[in-house]
Image (cartoon, rainbow, N blue to C red):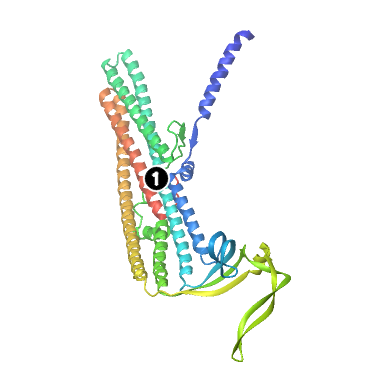
Amino acid sequence: MKSKSTPFFILALLLSSIGFNSISAQEIWTLERCVNYALENSLDIQNAKIQVEQQLLNNKDAKYAQYPSVNGSFGLNQNLGNAIDPTKNTFESSFTSNTFGINSSIPIYNHFKLKNQINQSKLILEAVESEAKATANDLALNVALSYLNVLFAKENLKVAQNQLELNQAQLKQINILIDAGSNPRSERLDVEAQIAMSEGEIIARENEYDINLLSLKQLLLLDPNINMVVETPEVPMPDLNIAVNTDFNNIYEQALKTQPLVDAYNARLKSALLDVDIAEADLYPSVFFGLGMNTQYSSVALRPTGESFRVEERYQLVINNLLEDVIRPIDLPFTENTPYFNQIGNNFGVGLGFSANIPIFNGYRARTNIERAKLNIANVENQAETYRQQLKADIQNAIANGRAAQKTLEARQKTVAAMELAMTNAEKRYSVGAMNTYEFITAKNQLQEAQTQVIIAKYDYIFKLKVIDFYLGKPIKL
């Protein structure tokens, strides 16, 4: 008995293992997980982060520009023919020279140009960070809407599946009545045709679900073959008074406080105003303090050895109107090449000084830059006002769409309520033979269509409310 049961045990174990693997391969995706995944992997978000990092580097450049600049120099030269020896400033032939130097320049005054550039760089960083937040908010909204599309298609598919189950149950009842001789066999054909239509409807709804799920995967940059299962939370019927009681002025004022692009335009406008001050600084002198240290070596530099030799110097002088020869002894020192490090130490020098750059005429570039900066202010102001006007229009459209969706949902709910009463009456009439199968199926189809329209209206209303929540600065959640 044990040997006979073993194959069945192994088969059951294999089947359970296959079933477990297929279930474990499925990944449950909540709305929060979808949004977080999109924010982590979106190319637009990555690009926004890169722009922020680039501006952080620009901030460093602007900050460090106010500090002294220090540069070292080194030179090694082999001179052939007559050239000036840097240690003696005399002409020598065929010698080697070596120079070292360190120079520093410190900005003292530039009409606050560096300070304004630092402040401007900070404002640009604020603008770039706000624009990155706006990109993230837009992505989160798009993911939420795509997620709701999947839930809508899933619920629509459920309605079609329920309808098929009802039709199959009706076919069983018809068969019983036909076998009992109460109904003609032709009524079976009507039900079978309805079952075929329901099966076709399920296929259509499954395709719709697959397409919406694929759209969500593409938005998340996921592999289309991943076994993604969207969590189906309980999405209650939204309050039908939300859209009616929505006030435009309240939403617009809130949007001005919460929409990142508003902050971005404000920061860019302040930056444009500083552009004028930065351009005007080029009309004023700039003063720098300079510090330099240098030393040098020459292969022809000589130094006395401490010993000397005597030579006679002959020359003529006029004495008592007579030209007389004069001989004078002179002691000349013996010399040797000055060692390298001795020259480096002896020739070391430090120089300090101030320099000023005074603009006199530069082809009107400074004044042209000032005018260009002023035009940029007008351009940024125009862009900011264009955005505010577009924001007003978008909010007005969102409110109008929300109210229209609310009215549509109310109408669809009333239609379903009426259809349900009509269906209850149809079931009673059908059960007593006062209605034929075709009429009964028609009434049932009308109820199904009305229920489907309620689902469509419900999710459309939720879509519109999420857009309103977006402008209110509320987090995107179901």
Q: Nearer the viewer, residue 261 or 426?
A: 261
Query: Percent x, y for residue 17?
Result: 55, 22
Q: Nearer the viewer, residue 28 or 195?
A: 28
Question: Which image quarter holds the C terminus?
Answer: top left
Question: Which image quarter holds the N terminus?
Answer: top right
For disc 1, the marked residue is 142
Rendered view: 50 above or below 86: above
Which picture quadrant has residue 299?
bottom right
Q: Nearer the viewer, residue 331 or 163?
A: 331
Please tell me which residue is depicted at 72% across the width and 72% down the height of the picture.
Answer: 308
User: Which residue appears farthest toward the front when viewing the image?
Assistant: 322
Query: Percent x, y for residue 396?
Result: 31, 55
Rendered view: 216 above or below 391: above
Query: Percent x, y for residue 454?
Result: 33, 39
Is residue 271 in sight in this rendering?
yes
Query: Percent x, y for residue 436?
Result: 26, 23
Q: Amino acid at mark 1?
A: Asn
Rendered view: 218 above or below 276: above
Badge 1 crowding class, 10 Å Cα cut-off, few under 14, some 14 to 19, many 20 or more, is some
Q: Nearer the viewer, residue 292 or 215?
A: 292
How many numbered discs?
Answer: 1
Is residue 259 in sight in this rendering?
no
Please tell me which residue is depicted at 35% across the width and 28% down the height of the picture.
Answer: 202
Which picture quadrant has residue 217?
top left
Mark 1: secondary structure: helix
